[in-house]
Every structure is written in structure tokens, then in C-alpha cells.
């Protein structure tokens, strides 16, 4: 049994809210994330308002497999992609060139998109149940500390998500690393 078991009913409820344009909170490798359908501009804008995050900063997408992220980003050369794919699943976020069809509500003012294949069993199960990538940004306001437990999500936000999927974060004490896909340069460690 996984360390974060989630019932079929709870997965179905999360999927329902995502299809309805809702926002869910869920545990990730280090903190609780806020997520929604990345193709739903109204949901993303509501998530940004909930977090009080400016759109120009861009967002992260997570998935249970790279193929769910591929519609949003261009592949790099084989050597670069081999390094990136070897770091997944895990708490490693990579900036890859965004496809021209990737909405600016995801990329912000950037030509890249931050993507990660999550190793967190509950977050991966949510992505599988949803059938694709999810927006993933920490459940907190601005520069305040992120939530690490379900109850903290309620304390950290003034506007509440439609559903909080309770579970344990994977125990990392730091958010995922962020690296530039083209150079491999560490941008956040």
C-alpha cells in the first residue's frame, strides 16, 4: 500500500472538481500544492487570485509521466532530454521551451514552461485520474510559508480551494529544484 492511499471516490471527486473548473489542494514532494486544469484560463486566473500571484511569473505543471507534459513543451536534443528524463520522477522541475499553443496564463512572460514528473504517489494518482497534467503551485500567499499539512491550507489562504485532498507531503524540506532545460543551470535549489 502506498504511503498516501487515496480512495477511488476521492479521486473521482477531485476529477469532478477539475472538470468543473475547480481548484484542488494536494500534497507534493515538499509542500501542499494548488492545482487546476491547465487548459482552463478561468480556473488558472482564479488560482492566481487565490494565491495573489501575478500571472507574469508563470506556473509549474506536474504529471505522472512525461507524455502528459509533451503537449505544452518542445523537446530538446536527445542528450539534454536524457538528463531531464533521468531526473524523473522526482522533485526536479525543468524549464523547457513552451509550444506556441501553450497559453500565456501558464508561461507568464516567459518563453519556457516549468514542468515536473512527480514522484509523490498521491499527486501522481491525481494526474492519472485526471488524465493529464495539472497546475502545481504552493498553497500559500506570496512570500508566506507554504502549507505542509491539509489544515494549513485553510490557514494560509483567504480564498479556499474547492477540494483539499488530505495526505502527507513526501518529507522534502525544500521545494523542488528548478533548472534550465537548455543549459542544466540550477535556478532554484
Image: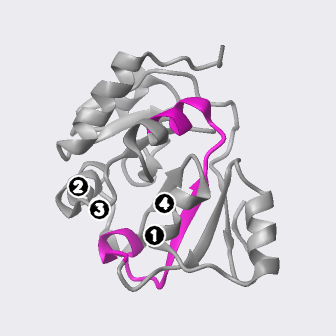
How would you rate the neighbour count of disc 1 (Cα within 10 Å): few for under 14, some for 14-19, many for 20 or more?
some
Q: Earlier in the sequence, mark 4 or mark 2?
A: 2
Q: Going 57% across and 23% down the picture, which residue do you hit?
A: 168
Q: Earlier in the sequence, mark 3 or mark 4?
A: 3
Query: Of tags 3 and 1, which is closer to the observer?
Result: 1
Give the left or right position of residue 84, taking residue 160 as reference: right
Task: Give the SS element for disc 3.
Answer: loop
Q: Nearer the viewer, residue 175 or 69?
A: 69
Check disc 4 and report the residue beneath it: 60
Residue 144 inside the magenta-drawn segment: no
Q: Position of residue 43 (x, y in %)?
A: 22, 53
Relative to 65, residue 6 above or below? above
Query: Of tags 2 and 1, which is closer to the observer?
Result: 1
Q: Earlier in the sequence, mark 3 or mark 2?
A: 3
Relative to 177, residue 90 above or below? above
Q: Position of residue 35 (x, y in %)?
A: 37, 46
Q: Earlier in the sequence, mark 3 or mark 1?
A: 3
Residue bounds of the magenta highlight:
102-126
Residue 49's tag is 2
Is residue 1 visible to us here? Answer: yes
Check disc 1 and report the residue beneath it: 71
Distance from the alpha carbon under mark 4 to that under mark 2: 16 Å
Amino acid at each position: 500500500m502506498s504511503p498516501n492511499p487515496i480512495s477511488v471516490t476521492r479521486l473521482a471527486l477531485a476529477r469532478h472538481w477539475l472538470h468543473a473548473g475547480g481548484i484542488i489542494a494536494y500534497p507534493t514532494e515538499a509542500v501542499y500544492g494548488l492545482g487546476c486544469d491547465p487548459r482552463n484560463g478561468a480556473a488558472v486566473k482564479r488560482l492566481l487570485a487565490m494565491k495573489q500571484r501575478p500571472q507574469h511569473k508563470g506556473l509549474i505543471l506536474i504529471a505522472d509521466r512525461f507524455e502528459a507534459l509533451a503537449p505544452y513543451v518542445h523537446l530538446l536534443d536527445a542528450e539534454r532530454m536524457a538528463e531531464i528524463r533521468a531526473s524523473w520522477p522526482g522533485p526536479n522541475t525543468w524549464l523547457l521551451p513552451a509550444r506556441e499553443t501553450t497559453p500565456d496564463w501558464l508561461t507568464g512572460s516567459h518563453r519556457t514552461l516549468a514542468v515536473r514528473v512527480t514522484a509523490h504517489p498521491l499527486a501522481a494518482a491525481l494526474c492519472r485520474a485526471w488524465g493529464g497534467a495539472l497546475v502545481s503551485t504552493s498553497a500559500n500567499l506570496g512570500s508566506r510559508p507554504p502549507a505542509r499539512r491539509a489544515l494549513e491550507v485553510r490557514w494560509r489562504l483567504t480564498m479556499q480551494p474547492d477540494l483539499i485532498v488530505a495526505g502527507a507531503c513526501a518529507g522534502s524540506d525544500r521545494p523542488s529544484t528548478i533548472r534550465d532545460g537548455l543549459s542544466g543551470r540550477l535556478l532554484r535549489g
